[in-house]
Amino acid sequence: MATPEKKSFSIVSLVIDLVLVAVAFVIFYWLVESHVPSNNPTMIHLWGGLAAGCMAGVFWLAWQMLKVVYRFQRDTRK
């Protein structure tokens, strides 16, 4: 039977992840807002936020995959 591996969850890593995703959301929103084809400010905020939310979600997934691959490579060197 394989030895159980330790969980690598901590509050500090969660806070870092949330801050990075929030920064990515703000950057994506800033980039996307000018590309919304509308003159209504409510629609611009709505669709800019929805598009930035989707892109921030993809950023979060990519960040998690990067952390897992880095952890795996670091552990296999030992």
Image: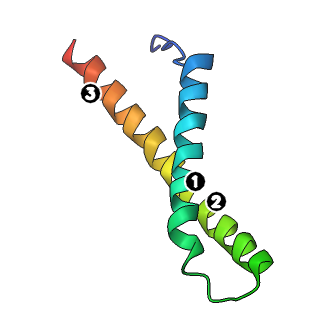
Residues tagged 2 and 1 counted as in contact (Cβ below 8 A): yes
Q: Is residue 44 above or below residue 72?
A: below
What secondary structure is found at the residue carrying circle 2? helix
Q: Nearer the viewer, residue 18 or 5?
A: 18
Q: Residues within 10 Å of mark 3 (few under 14, many from 20)?
A: few
- Side (left or right) of 78 relative to 63: left
Q: Which mark is residue 25?
A: 1
* Residue at (30% x, 18% y) in the render: 75
User: Where is residue 20 drawn, in percent x and y?
Assistant: 52, 39
User: Where is residue 13 drawn, in percent x and y?
Assistant: 54, 23
* Residue at (32% x, 30% y) in the render: 70
Q: Which residue is mark 3?
A: 73
Q: Which mark is residue 53?
A: 2
Q: Nearer the viewer, mark 3 or mark 1?
A: 1
Question: Disc 3 and disc 2: Cα gap in Å?
Answer: 30 Å
* Residue at (64% x, 59% y) in the render: 53
Q: Is residue 40 above or below residue 60?
A: below
